[in-house]
Each structure stands twice: as C-alpha cells, then as structure tokens.
Image: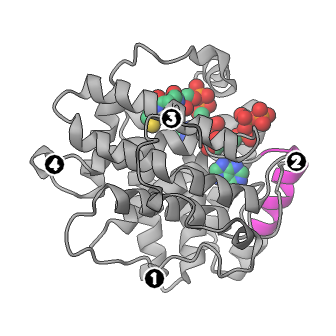
Amino acid sequence: MSDSLPWSERPARVAGRFPKEAATSDGSLGQSSRATGRQAWPARPDAVTLAELAVQALLDEATLTPKPGLVDLRGRGSHTDIHIGLMCVSANALRPGLEAMALAGAADWRDLRVLRERLGLLGRATESAMMAATEGVNTHRGAIWALGLLVAAANMPSRCGGFRPATIAKRAGAIASQPDRFAGDPATHKGGRACAQYGVAGARGQAQAGFPHVLQYGLPTLHASRRQGAEESCARLDALMAILAKLDDTCVLARGGPHALRSLQDAAANILKAGGTATCRGKQLLNHMDSEALRLGVSPGGAADLLAATLFLDSLTV
Ligand SMILES: CC(C)(COP(=O)(O)OP(=O)(O)OC[C@H]1O[C@@H](n2cnc3c(N)ncnc32)[C@H](O[C@H]2O[C@H](COP(=O)(O)OP(=O)(O)OP(=O)(O)O)[C@@H](O)[C@H]2O)[C@@H]1O)[C@@H](O)C(=O)NCCC(=O)NCCS
Ligand SMILES: Nc1ncnc2[nH]cnc12
C-alpha cells in the first residue's frame, strides 16, 4: 500500500487477513460466521468490525454461485479480466479504506458536507488501493461507493437515530446528497455516460435516494426466502434477482444497451415468479439467464454491489 494513502497510519492488523492462495480454493471460501444470516452483536460494532463485515459481505457476494454473467466460483462470467481470486484480493484490499470511512462517520457526523468530502477523498484513495491490488482492473468501484457510505452512516453516533438498516441507508443517502467540490467529472465515467444517455440514476442516484433497491427488494426478499426455508445461498440469489429485476444497472446498459437490461430484468422477475432459485423451475431459468447474459456479453455489477450492501446491512441485524 502506498504511504501517501490517507489511512497509512492505520495499524497493519486490519490488512491482509485473507490469504491470496485461499482466494481460489473451494466453496468454503467466503462463508461467513453468519452462514445462517444471523449474528448477534453485544454492542454496536466499531469501525474495525464494520469494515470487516463489509469485506465479508463482498466476499459472500463474490463467492455466491451461480450468478448470471458475474464472476463466481465457477468462473469469469462475461468478464475477460476478472476471476474469483482477483475479486477476493480486491475485497481484502478495501478493508483499511472502509475502516477509515467508518471512522470518518464517527468523527465528522456534525457536518455532512465535510463528511461527504472526507469520504470522497477516502473513496478515491480506496479506488487507487483497489486498482493497485488488481493491477488496474475495476472490480469494486461501485461497491466502494455504496459500502463506504453505509459504513460511515452505520458508525455515526446513536443520537443520529437508530441502528436499523432503513435508518443507516437514509443517513447514507443524506451524505451522498451533499456536494463534493473535489469529485471528478461523472461524464468521463462509463457509468456517468450511460446515465446521461439513457436517463437513469445510476450508482449516484441509488445512494442519494437512500438505497431503495436494498431496502425495498434485496432485504425483504432475503428475509422472505429464509422464512420459506430456502438454503442461505438460494435466499441470497433470490435477493440478487429481486434487485436485478428492478435496477437500471449501468454496467449492463453500458455494455449491452436497453435491450440487454430489459432481458435480464425480465429473466430475474420470471425466476421470482417461478418461486425463486430454490425451485427446480427457478434453477432452470437461472441457468438460462446465465447463458443469455454470456451471449449478450453483459454482467450486472451494479446489482452485485447492491447485494453486497444488502448482506452488509443484514449482518448488522441483531
Ligand atoms: C459516484 C460514483 C459511483 C461514480 O461513478 P460513475 O459516475 O461511474 O457511476 P455509475 O456507473 O452509475 O456507477 C459506478 C459503479 O456502480 C455500480 N453500479 C452500476 N449501476 C448501478 C446502479 N444502478 N446502482 C448502484 N450501483 C450501480 C457499478 O459497479 C460495479 O461494476 C463495476 C465493474 O463494471 P465493468 O463494466 O466490468 O467495469 P468498467 O471499468 O466500467 O469496464 P471496463 O473499463 O473494464 O470495460 C465494478 O466497479 C462494480 O463495483 C458501476 O461501475 C463513485 O464511484 C464516485 O464518485 N467515487 C469517488 C469516490 C467517492 O466520492 N466516494 C464517496 C463515498 S465512498
Ligand atoms: N461478482 C462480480 N462479478 C463481476 N463484477 C462484479 N462487481 C461486483 N461484484 C461482481
């Protein structure tokens, strides 16, 4: 890690807990201690724990299999430059940055404008750390944005409100809605251009609205599928389908256009209508959806990021 990073004074104890070799191992990789989706915290988690939970959510998302067009334990999906090992290395490289962003939430909560600019600085440095770890591949840019805002919001003092997912997401939305004088030009980003071309809100709009796809689709579907007795991996895949069915994912739009987006959204909705990914029909449809994503050359990276955000907020549930 570069010495110039703003958190370089942080102790090494938070870095590199996930060995590179383990990244390509079997299905046990990435399974959290909350494999049942439940973890009781004796008190509110501190910044180190919040960063750890966020990284775990990223690992859980990356290793969730089978996902349509996305990198998973089977392979690269529609990507040529990313594999599961890189996703895991990348997730682990974000830990110090996420911890610093959580600390910023506790330090700068009184002035959301100051906090937004602090998070912008840390977010851009975390993007650089990701790029250094992946040798220039964009694995988690959207995830840094979403989880950075959420860990900061989760670490604001309790007088800012409760610790429920809805409260944390709303606070994150308030931070994201503040201006950042130092932000780059969105029109130079592929996602920013897709937003302008197709009139969609993208990752920025999703965060500013307080993560509606996480609160209205991801979390309720995760919980409903668990209640219906689905295995944890199926409940998580169902949550991904629920997000995907409704999200204007700029990764899909940028690579495949509106036709590809509609095709994935319809396929995800049909899987849920068939009873979800735990059913035989749901599994068949998921297989078909995966083939279609590969044929179209698209990968719903935005929906995957929001699944990680869903799993992170779920992991805070006592
Ligand atoms: C505000 C930013 C998000 C700026 O980003 P941008 O203007 O580019 O906005 P979006 O494209 O809308 O979003 C960026 C990433 O967010 C994910 N995403 C896409 N759609 C949505 C959506 N509707 N809702 C939520 N999230 C969404 C997605 O990230 C994932 O995909 C990336 C991989 O995609 P891929 O196409 O393979 O990679 P590319 O590099 O684009 O392609 P190639 O060049 O390889 O061909 C991967 O990152 C996933 O995570 C979008 O890509 C924000 O990033 C920003 O301002 N950051 C600065 C720091 C900051 O202010 N931080 C503050 C808080 S931490
Ligand atoms: N599993 C995944 N595959 C490809 N891009 C992603 N972005 C976030 N998660 C991803």
* Callout 4–callout 2 Cβ contact below 8 Å: no
Above-or-below relation of 154 to 222:
above
In this figure, which residue is indicated by the disc labeled 1? 36
In the rendered structure, which disc, 3 or 1, sits on the residue that comes first in sequence? 3
Q: Quadrant of the C terminus?
A: bottom left
Give the x, y percent position of residue 278.
Answer: 63, 80
Q: CA distance from mark 3 to mark 1?
A: 36 Å
In the rendered structure, which disc, 4 or 2, sits on the residue that comes first in sequence? 2
Give the x, y percent position of residue 118.
Answer: 36, 29
Secondary structure beneath disc 4?
Answer: loop
Give the x, y percent position of residue 119.
Answer: 39, 32
Q: CA distance from mark 4 to mark 2?
A: 43 Å
Query: Could you tell me which residue is drawn at 66 percent across and 81 percent down?
Result: 279
Q: Nearer the viewer, residue 8 or 30?
A: 8
How many other residues sit within 10 Å of disc 1, few (<14), some (14-19) or many (≥20)?
A: few
Q: Quadrant of the N terminus?
A: top right
* Quarter, ligand 1: top right
Q: Nearer the viewer, residue 99 or 142?
A: 99
In this figure, which residue is indicated by the disc labeled 3? 5
Q: CA distance from mark 3 to mark 4?
A: 26 Å
Q: Give the overall secondary structure of the magenta segment.
A: helix
Question: Which callout, 3 or 2, points to the residue nearer the camera?
Answer: 3
